[in-house]
Amino acid sequence: MTLDIVTLSIALFFISSIQAIVMLFLFRIIQNYPGMYYLLASCLFSALSGLIFAVCTSLMYKDLAILGSNIFSFLAVTALNIGFTKFLGLQMKKRKLFILIVLLLTGLSAFSLEHDNISCRIILYSVLIATLSFLNTDILFHHKVDSVRPATRMVAFIHMLFGLFFALRALFTLFCQTTALMIPILFQLMAFFISIAGILIWSCCFIIMAVQRERSEKEQANERFRQIFETIPDTVFISSMETGEILEVNEKYTEETGYTREETIGKTPLELKLWSNTKERERFVDLIRKQGFCKNTEIRVVAKNGRKISALISSSLMKMNHNTYIISVIRNISHNKELAKKLNTSEETFKAIMEQSPVSFMLTDINGNIEYVNQKFLELTGYREEEVIGQNPRILKSGFQTKRFYQTLWATITSGRQWTGDIRNKKKNGEIMWEHICLTPILDEDGSIMRFLAVQEDISRRKLMEDELRIQARTDMLTGVMNRRYFMENAEKRLLKTRTDHEIAAFLMIDIDRFKDINDSFGHNMGDKAIRIVASQCQKMLKKGDLFGRIGGEEFGALIFSSDQEDYYQIADTIRYGVEIIDFLYEQEEKIPLRISIGLTVYRPGEDTLETLMHRADVALYQAKKDGRNRVVLI
C-alpha cells in the first residue's frame, strides 16, 4: 500500500474507531463525568471523516469525499470543544460555535457546488479549524479543576500546535494556489498525520484527565468523610456485618465509653460488653439484617467504668471491597432524659401553681391563638375549656376599647416588650368585667417569641368603687347635682372658653325662700325633700351645656349660656315660675309654699372672674330677698 491520502484516511478511520471502543470501555470503569460522551462523539466523527474520504474517493466521488470529510473533521473538533467545556465545568460559547459551523457549511457549499475552487476550500477549512483549535486551547488553559491541570496543559499545547499548523496551511495555500486535490503534497499529508497524532494524544490525555479527576474526587471524598467522622458530635464506629469486629471508631467514642482506639479495634461489642442488654443487641442485629438500617433505636451502653448510658443508635449497611459493614451513630441522651424528667416535674409544678392561682392565666401561640387557660379563667369568663382552646382572645372583646388601642397593645408585645393595663372585657353571658392584664412575650434561647402569657386579675369591684368615689367627689349626695367644688372647677373652665367661643354667659344664684320655716314647721326630712325638688326642677329647665350645682345649704348656682343677653332674665324667671307651681304637700294633704329667689348677673369677658361674678349674683339675690322674695333681680 502506497503512502497516499486514501491510505492515511483509512488509517485515521481505524485509529479513531479503536479510540472510540477504548472510550466505551473506559466509561464502564470510571465515573461518568459531564462531557465524556462528546469526546466519544469526537472519535466517531474522526472515524467517519476518514471512512467517507476513503470510500468516496474509491468510488470517484471526489467532491463528496472532500465535503463530507471536512464537515466530519470539523464536527470532531467541535465535539472536543463541547466535551472539554462540560468536563471542566465552564460556560459553553454557543454563539461562536454556531457562527463557525454556519461559515463552514456555507463556504464549503459555495466553493464545492457553485465555484469549484479547491484553494478557497482549503483556506476556509484551515482557518475555521485553526480558530476552533485556539478556542479549545483557551478552554484548556482557563479552568478551575486543579486535579486535571497537568493533562489539560498538555492537550492545550497540542491544540495550539494543531491550530498553528492549519493557520500556516491556510497561508501557504493562499500564496500557492492548487487545483489538484488528490495529489499528496506535504501539507495535505501532514494534515492527516497531525489529525491521527492529535486523536491519539488527546484521547490518551483525556483518559489521564478522567482518571486524575476520579482519584482526586475519591481522595476529597475520603478526606471529607474523615473530617465528618472525627468532628461529628456523636459516637461513630464501623463494624463487620459477618464477624461483628469493630474496624474504626472516632474520638467521641473514646470520650463516651472510656475505651481507647487500640483497646477497641479488632474486638466485638460483646467482647467489650458495650451492650447492657443482650436482647437489645439481638433485636438490633435482626432489624439490620431484615431492613438494612435502623433509626433512633433506644439502647443502653455500658462504659468502661461501668457507667450506663442512655443512647439512640442509628445504623445502616455499607458495602466496600465485596464486604458488608455496619456504620453506626450513637447519640448520648442521658442528659436529655434527666432534663426531660426535671421538665416534667417543673411542668407539673407549674400546672399546679397555675390551676390553684387566684388570678387567671392564658397562654397563646405567636398568632394569638389560645393554647392553655387555667380554672380561674374559666370561672371568671363562664366559658368551658373546649370553647376557648384554639380561639383568639378577641372572643372576650367588649367593644369598649378602640382599634388603635389593640394595635398599640399588639405592637408592644410582638416587639418583645411587656404590656400592662386595664381592659374592659365581656364574659360568655355578655356581662361586662374589668381586668388588669399583664401580657408577657415568652422568648426562646435565640430571643425569638414562642408564646404570649396573659396574667389577668378581675378588678370589676375595684373599678366600681373607683367610679363611686369619683361620683362622690363631684356630686352632691342629697340632690345628685354637682357639688360646690366640682361646679366651681367646671364653671371656671367654661368661662375661659367663652373668651374664644364668643358666647354670652350669665350666672344665677338661686335660694329657697323661707327654708328655715319649712325645716322648723315640718321637719328636716321635708326640708331635704324641698332641696331635692328644687334642684331637680332647676336642672330640668336648663338646656344642655349649662352648668348647675349646689353651692351650700338651700343655695344653688347656675351658669347659663345664650347668644342674646336679653334672654337671661326670661330664662331665670321661667325657672322661678317652674318651682312656684310645684305641688309640695305635707303628708299628702297640706300644701307647703315652695318659692325661690334668683340673683342674676351677666359675665363681662376680660373684667370678671368667677369670684366677682358670684359676688355680684349674690348681691342681686340679696336684693331679691329684700324686695319681697319669689322674684328675679338683675345686676
Image (spheres, helix red, strand yellow):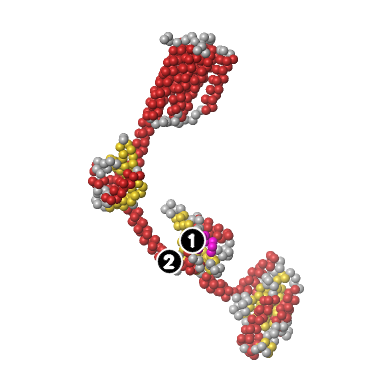
Q: Quadrant of the C terminus?
A: bottom right
Which residue is at 67% across, 67% downward? Answer: 497
Q: Which mark is on residue 389?
A: 1
Q: Is residue 391 magenta?
A: yes
At x 40% / y 65%, what residue is drawn?
A: 352
Q: Position of residue 599 (x, y in %)?
A: 70, 79
Please tell me whether mark 1 sits on a helix, a strand or a loop. Answer: loop
Label 2: which secondary element: helix
**Residue, disc 2:** 355
Q: Which residues are magenta?
A: 387-396
Name the amino acid type tagged 1: Ile
Report the side of 241 relative to 171 (left or right): left
What is the x, y in percent for residue 563?
A: 74, 69
The crowd level at tag 2 (other Cα within 10 Å; few <14, some 14-19, many 20+) is some
Q: Give yes or no for contact between labels 1 and 2 (Cβ–Cβ under 8 Å).
A: no
Q: Which quarter of the rendering shows the N terminus? A: top left
Question: Does residue 457 belong to the magenta stretch?
Answer: no
For residue 176, say whether it is visible: no
Residue 198, quarter of picture: top left
- The dominant secondary structure in magenta is helix
Q: Earlier in the sequence, mark 1 or mark 2?
A: 2
On the question of residue 558 being in view, the answer is yes
Rendering coords of residue 28 (x, y %): 39, 29
